[in-house]
Amino acid sequence: MPTEPALPLMPPKNSISVPEISRPLEKWFSETRRDLPWRKNRSIYRVWVSEVMLQQTRVDTVIPYFHRFLGQFPNVSDLAETDQENVLKLWEGLGYYARARNLHRAAGIVMEKFNGIIPDQPEQFRQLPGVGPYISAAVMSMACGHPIPVVDGNVLRAACRIFALEDDITRPATRKKVAALLAGQIPENRPGEFNEAMMELGATLCTPKSPDCSYCPVAHLCIANKKNLISKLPVKTPRGAIPEHRIVVAVITDSSERMLIQKRPEHGLLGGLWEFPGGKVEERETLEGALKRECREELGVEVEIGQEIKTIRHAYTHFKIHLTAFHCAIVSGTISSPLPTRWATMADIIALPFPKANHKLFPALRAEKCE
């Protein structure tokens, strides 16, 4: 069944007086747009891949990943036919791995249910895994010409300033209000250019700090600029302190110098990636005590804790970790785990998809192999 649009496309009741921004915005965009690889060929597949990668990720970071990904999987058929592990390996370091898993699943569905043709209608495209309001609006407008406004973080910030919205941008209602306001602006014959121009404005000029209003193509229309409210908008509820966790992992080696690794569950944080066994240190636990408990729970074995290898720090979006790796030896029990588990050489490990935090341990492990 067709899905209902997630964002309203009618202006809100009692809406503010809205300046007409499309013409100066598109003129500025046509003259100053950045030369980005996904703008050179507007196939629905290329736009889709780029927009999935660009979610919560900087453009400069995405560019080399986009080139590698399209070089390996130039079309939806190639993507559908490969193993998920190959997709995750190419995605390695880009983060938010659910995006990669969903894109791979969606490619399979396109081949099975849509005869290999990516749907060009919003109702059908929204049925694919990982396709939410943002991805749908971006791909359908830029590649297929549907006049659906895109509302990402950059657009949200710029729009709140242009229209002087004092609503908290962390609230879903604010995102809906912005979408409704932009729905009245987006031109039916060039919706993709308008959406890209809004995103470009937020990314390059209407930045969170020190926005460059002197070069803004709609500064003369911007209500916040006229009322000297730029520094006060957008309104955003401060985020609480980011929690920090202590993590311990075991580097268990067999007689052939291979290391024991596990594959994380498909769903959840870092799903489908390989890692060294271990986990979170609970309150009042020592690092060694926590690692023995984790090996007992995850692998069904008792271990002897050896020399510390390294402690690294790593930040995720909503928390930070201090991860310590120890050499360990199995002293009793037989390895038994509900998760895929294998012995791997250093070369194997380099070839498999691993979390970035584990990657920070690799130089120390390679150095030991060379001693």
Image: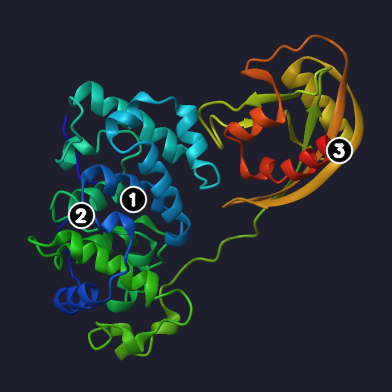
Q: Nearer the viewer, mark 3 or mark 1?
A: 1
Residue drawn 42% across and 75% down?
207
Compared to residue 329, the image places residue 45 above or below, namely below
Closer-to-camera residue (335/13): 335
Q: Amino acid at mark 1?
A: Glu
Q: Which part of the image, by quadrant, shows the N terminus?
A: top left
Q: Which SS class for mark 1?
A: helix
Question: Type of residue at label 2?
Answer: Met
Q: Secondary structure at mark 3?
A: helix
Q: Quadrant of residue 367?
A: top right
- Label 2: state its secondary structure: helix
The picture places residue 81, in percent across and down from the top left corner, at: 35, 24
State the CA–CA distance, disc 3 to disc 2: 51 Å
Rendered residue at 24%/89% (across/down)? 220
Q: Residue 287 bears which disc, if any?
A: 3
- Tally of marks: 3
Q: Is residue 337 visible?
A: yes
Q: Position of residue 216 (x, y in %)?
A: 30, 83
Amino acid bearing label 3 = Leu
